[in-house]
C-alpha cells in the first residue's frame, strides 16, 4: 500500500510539472511588426542559437529570479554582450511608416524605458541606433522613430511630446525582429517577461507585443533559464533643460568672447582637412546645421566665427558667426564629425581637452530634445541636422540650454 501511494504521488508530481511547462509556453502570445548570477542553464527549443560563449544548457527550470541591487550607470554604457548588428534590420524601420509610427525629426520631449534580454542567464546588449535613419539628399535631416536607441545601454528612448505610450511590439517592429512566446529577436526557447516599476518585479503573462513600455521602468525578457538575479539600474540623467530660450540669430553672439575668430595657424589653410574640401562657389545642395556650446566652470564661451572660411574658399563645414552654429554646406551627403570641425579650426579635441581648455570634460548630445550623455571619443560625434553638442568643463551644469534655431539656406 505504501509503494502504491508513492507511485501515485510521483505520477501526480510529474503531471503538475508538465502542466506548468505548458502554461509557461502558452503565456505571452503575439508577435511584434545588469550584473547577474546565472542560474542553471536550460536547453533551448529546436533551432535556437545560443549567444556567443553561452554554455549548452541541460534542463529547464522554473526558477523565479530576484531583483538585484541597482547599479549606477550613465548613458553610453554598454550593458551585456554583443549579439545583434546595430540599427534596424532590412525588415524594420528604414524610413517608412511602421504601423502607426512615423520616422520624423526628433520630438521636443523624451522619456525612456529600459530593456534587458537574457539567454540562459547571460545578458545580451541591445544594439545601438535601432530606429534611427541616416540623412539622405532627399531627407537631409534624417529621421528617428518615436521609439529608438542611441547606444547599447538598453535604453529605449520614447518621444512623449504628445503624451503617447508605446508597446514592446512596436519597438520590435521598428527593430525588424520577431517577438513571440518562443522567439526574441531570433533567440528561440521558452520566453518569460518581467517588469520592474519602482523596485517591484512582476512577471508579465500577457501578449508580449502588447506590453506597454513603462516610463523609467525596466522590462526583462528571458529566453530559456532565467538568471538568479535580474539586474536593475540607477541612471545618472542629464541636467534638465532651462526654461529660458536662447535664440540663435544669424550674425549673433552667444556666450562670452574667448577664442580668436577664424582658423588657428594649425587649422585649415585651403588644402583638404580630414576629407573636407575648401572651394569657392561650392554647391550647397546638402545644407544642414549643427551646434556646439562650450561651458567652462559654468561660463558659456562663444564659439568663434569664420572657422573654415578663408579669403579664397570655404570648407564644407564652417561658422559664420559667434552663435556656435556649424554650417554643413556641400554638394554630397557623407558623414561629418565634430573632430573634423576642430581640425579645420586647428584646435585639440579629446575627453580631457577642448580647444586648449583642460579639466573634467562631460559631453551632452541633444537632438531637438532627445538628450543624453556621450561617453565616447568626442571627435567621433556625428554632426547631423539640429544636433547640439554641449561641453561641460569643470563645474557641473544645473541646466542645459534650450534653443530657438534659425535655418537659413
Image (cartoon, grey):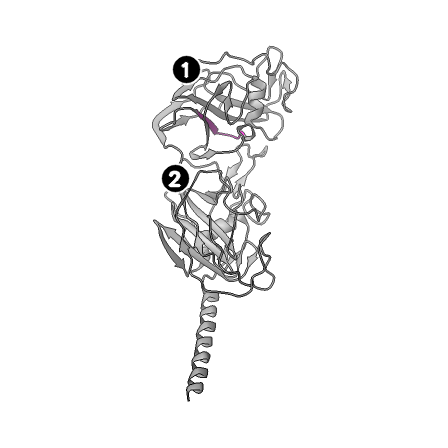
Q: Is residue 73 above or below residue 14?
A: above
- Is 356 placed left or right of 295 in the picture? right
Numbered circles on residues, count = 2
Is label 1 or label 2 in front? Answer: 1
Most foreground residue, 165 or 86? 86
Q: Which x, y percent locates residue 50? A: 58, 56
Magenta stretch prevailing secondary structure: strand
**Location of mark 1 (residue):** 256
Identified at 45% across, 13% down, the residue is 258
User: Can residue 11 be seen from the camera position used here?
Assistant: yes
The kind of secondary structure element at disc 1 is loop
Most foreground residue, 16 or 179? 16
Please identify the residue farthest to the bottom as the structure is shown.
1
Q: Magenta span covers which residues?
A: 383-392
Most foreground residue, 152 or 329? 152
Q: Is residue 407 above or below residue 251?
A: below
**Location of mark 2 (residue):** 161
The kind of secondary structure element at disc 2 is loop
Amino acid at each position: 500500500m505504501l509503494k502504491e501511494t508513492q507511485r501515485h504521488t510521483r505520477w501526480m508530481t510529474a503531471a503538475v510539472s508538465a502542466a506548468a511547462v505548458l502554461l509557461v509556453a502558452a503565456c505571452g502570445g503575439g508577435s511584434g511588426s545588469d550584473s547577474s548570477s546565472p542560474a542553471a542553464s536550460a536547453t533551448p527549443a529546436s533551432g535556437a542559437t545560443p549567444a556567443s560563449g553561452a554554455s549548452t544548457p541541460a534542463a529547464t527550470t522554473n526558477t523565479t529570479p530576484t531583483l538585484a541591487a541597482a547599479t549606477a550607470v550613465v548613458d553610453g554604457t554598454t550593458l551585456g554582450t554583443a549579439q545583434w548588428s546595430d540599427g534596424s534590420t532590412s525588415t524594420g524601420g528604414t524610413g517608412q511608416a511602421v504601423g502607426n509610427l512615423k520616422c520624423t525629426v526628433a520630438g521636443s520631449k523624451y522619456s525612456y524605458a529600459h530593456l534587458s534580454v537574457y539567454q540562459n542567464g547571460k545578458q545580451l546588449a541591445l544594439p545601438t541606433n535601432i530606429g534611427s535613419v541616416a540623412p539622405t539628399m532627399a531627407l537631409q535631416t534624417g529621421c528617428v522613430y518615436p521609439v529608438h536607441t542611441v547606444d547599447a545601454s538598453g535604453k529605449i528612448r520614447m518621444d512623449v511630446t504628445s503624451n503617447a505610450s508605446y508597446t514592446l511590439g512596436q519597438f520590435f517592429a521598428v527593430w525588424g525582429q520577431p517577438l513571440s512566446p518562443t522567439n526574441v529577436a531570433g533567440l528561440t526557447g521558452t520566453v518569460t517577461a518581467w517588469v520592474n516599476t519602482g523596485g517591484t518585479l512582476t512577471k508579465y503573462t500577457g501578449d508580449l507585443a502588447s506590453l506597454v513600455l513603462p516610463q523609467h521602468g525596466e522590462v526583462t525578457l528571458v529566453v530559456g533559464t532565467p538568471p538568479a538575479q535580474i539586474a536593475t539600474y540607477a541612471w545618472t540623467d542629464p541636467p534638465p533643460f532651462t526654461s529660458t530660450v536662447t535664440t540663435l540669430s544669424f550674425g549673433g553672439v552667444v556666450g562670452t568672447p574667448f577664442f580668436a575668430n577664424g582658423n588657428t595657424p594649425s587649422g585649415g589653410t585651403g588644402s583638404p582637412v580630414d576629407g573636407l574640401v575648401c572651394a569657392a562657389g561650392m554647391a550647397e545642395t546638402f545644407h544642414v546645421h549643427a551646434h556646439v556650446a562650450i561651458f567652462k566652470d559654468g561660463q558659456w564661451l562663444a564659439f568663434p566665427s569664420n572657422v573654415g572660411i578663408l579669403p579664397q574658399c570655404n570648407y564644407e563645414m564652417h561658422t559664420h558667426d559667434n552663435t556656435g552654429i556649424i554650417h554643413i554646406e556641400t554638394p554630397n551627403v557623407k558623414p561629418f564629425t565634430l573632430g573634423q570641425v576642430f581640425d579645420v579650426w586647428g584646435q585639440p579635441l579629446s575627453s580631457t581637452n577642448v580647444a586648449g581648455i583642460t579639466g573634467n570634460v562631460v559631453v551632452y548630445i541633444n537632438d531637438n530634445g532627445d538628450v543624453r550623455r556621450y561617453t565616447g571619443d568626442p571627435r567621433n560625434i556625428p554632426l547631423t541636422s539640429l544636433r547640439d553638442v554641449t561641453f561641460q568643463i569643470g563645474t557641473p551644469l544645473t541646466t542645459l540650454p534650450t534653443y530657438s534655431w534659425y535655418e537659413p539656406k
